[in-house]
Amino acid sequence: MKRTFIVQVLLFIILIIHSVYAIDFKPGSWVIVNVPALENSTKTVPVKLYIPKEYSKNSRTIIALHDYDGSMNSWQNNTNIAYYANMYNMVIVCPNMPKTVYESQFFDETTVKWNDLPAALWIGTILIPYLKNTVGLKIDKNSLGVCGFSIGARGALRIGEMYSDTVSAIACLSGYYDMLAHVKNNMFVAVYGKYNDNPQRWAAIDNAIDDAKNLKNVAVFLAHGNKDSRVPMEQSFMLAVKLKQLQKEQKSGYNFTFVEKKYKMHDWNFCQSVLPEMMAFFNENLK
């Protein structure tokens, strides 16, 4: 009787461990996992992963962030990122994060919250540890990259700046970087409140240009279409100038690449056009 009870307990423990940690990886396919919205919360955020055909525990990881009105399906549906994931043996992680500007705080004036936790904090404190400890992906300073398009490019930049001890490389495609150039943009007003009522907040909190100083050991890839009428290419120029200044001041540690795509606009066609260079950049900078 006692022996039977022990066996039953062991089987129960095995089932619990399997249900928590086992992800049904099918190399060469997309799979959805549900990540907690908060620590110890039953509320979840769907995240789509592409598992490369030659997946192993040494496969590198790229978190790919979509545009403001996009979804976890955006990179899959609008680019052939899976082709390059197979070529370079990388896992692609696409969280479902619509309507966020990758803020680190919410305020009394915040009217649009993508979820319970500010987006940048959720990626750094919930998603990344979950990918490492529960999904079992290779996540360390040398193997993790983040990319994004449009507002997702801002997200990639902010994650690189806030978690430079974990992220090795970022790729920012046609992003919103300087909030002070967008003081009437409803995306930002919905989080930070009106600029005229909160000028210090707009200047000091989540200032992606000033915080570029945190990118000393993070490789940066910038790309922009020169026909982009939605987000002027000056946004990428401004960030490139800031990184160049940091290079001169610090002598080393601020490595970036800038790609201008002629005749390309603010759309997924632009992203597809720059994808070969972006993925080659990750292959070079992730180990």
Image (cartoon, rainbow, N blue to C red):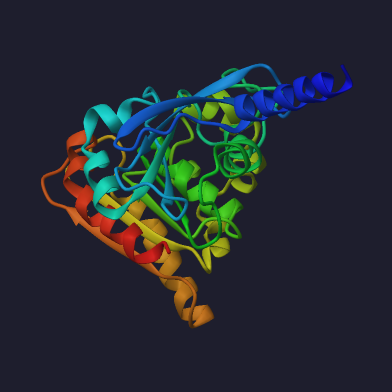
Q: Which residue lies furthest to the right in this view?
A: 2
In the picture shown, does residue 218 fall above or below 59? below
Q: Quadrant for residue 8, please give it.
A: top right
Query: Quadrant location of the N terminus?
Result: top right
Residue 39 horizontal side relative to residue 276, left or right? right
Query: Which residue is pictured at 41% across the width and 36% down the height?
Result: 151
Q: Nearer the viewer, residue 11 or 212?
A: 11
Q: Quadrant for residue 93, please give it.
A: top left
Q: Nearer the viewer, residue 76 or 199?
A: 76
Q: Which residue lies furthest to the bottom in this view?
A: 251
Query: Which residue is pictured at 58% across the width and 45% down the height?
Result: 132
Query: Which residue is pictured at 37% across the width and 46% down the height?
Result: 55
Residue 1 horizontal side relative to residue 227, left or right? right
Residue 107 location in percent, x, y? 69, 27
Residue 66 location in percent, x, y? 38, 33
Is there any visible trace of residue 264 in the rendered image? yes
Query: Which residue is pictured at 31% across the width and 44% down the height?
Result: 174
In the picture shown, does residue 150 fall above or below 97? below
